[in-house]
Amino acid sequence: MADHNEFGKIAEDLAVDFLVKAEYKILARNFRYLKAEIDIIAEKQNQIIIIEVKATNTDAFLEPQDAVNKKKIKLLISAANYFVEENNINKEVRFDIISVLPNHQKTLEINHIIDAFQSFEI
């Protein structure tokens, strides 16, 4: 496995641990539908939360969450709709981003952006 794939898996594992500690129930990981993949599907307070995990192991100029563009958002929405319909779920759906990146001490820091797509026009 390439280093970036391994780091991505570590970042997703950290995100899951973070969510579980925050009392989210994990419903699925790496859910695929057509060309889309949802990193984490969780539930909390009668909401389904679709979570995109973005990570970098460098002090990159671009924030990881900035890599989520309109095309990616449309794919996530399509996959989320499929998941909800296939599982007969009648709950509000929310889209979050969790970014994982090194801080100044070179440890990984998690930033949870709730309702991350509200500012996008799709």
Image: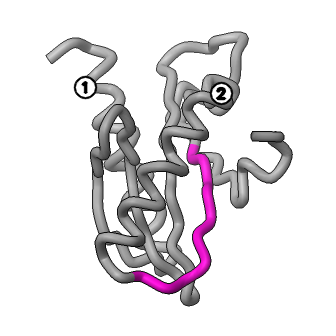
Height in image: 45 above or below 1? below
Residue occupying image coordinates x 60% and y 39%? 73
Task: Classify 49 as above or below 7.
Answer: below
Which label belongs to residue 73?
A: none
Write the residue at 58% across / 40% down: 74
On-image quarter of the N terminus? top left
| Residue at which label 1 appears | 6
Report how far apart the C-alphas of labels 1 and 2 lie in the structure: 23 Å
Residue drawn at 39 percent across, 71 percent down: 85
Q: Position of residue 81 (x, y in %)?
A: 47, 61
Magenta span: predominant SS is strand
Residues in magenta, as a range: 89-98
Number of numbered labels in the structure image: 2
User: Which three-letter amino acid code belongs to the residue tagged 2?
Assistant: Asn
Work out whether residue 95 or residue 35 is closer to the camera in this orientation and state it: 35
Residue position for label 2? 69
Tell me the quarter of the picture where residue 122 sits. Answer: top right
The percent position of residue 55, horizontal first and vertical second, equals 50, 29
Residue 68: x %, y % from top left: 62, 30
- Residue 83 seen in render: yes
Q: Is residue 44 above or below residue 119?
A: below
Residue 44, how many percent across, how many down? Answer: 52, 81
Give the camera-side residue of 7 and 96. Answer: 96
Mark closer to the chain start, 1 or 2: 1
**Is 93 part of what is drawn in magenta?**
yes
Q: Secondary structure at mark 2?
A: loop
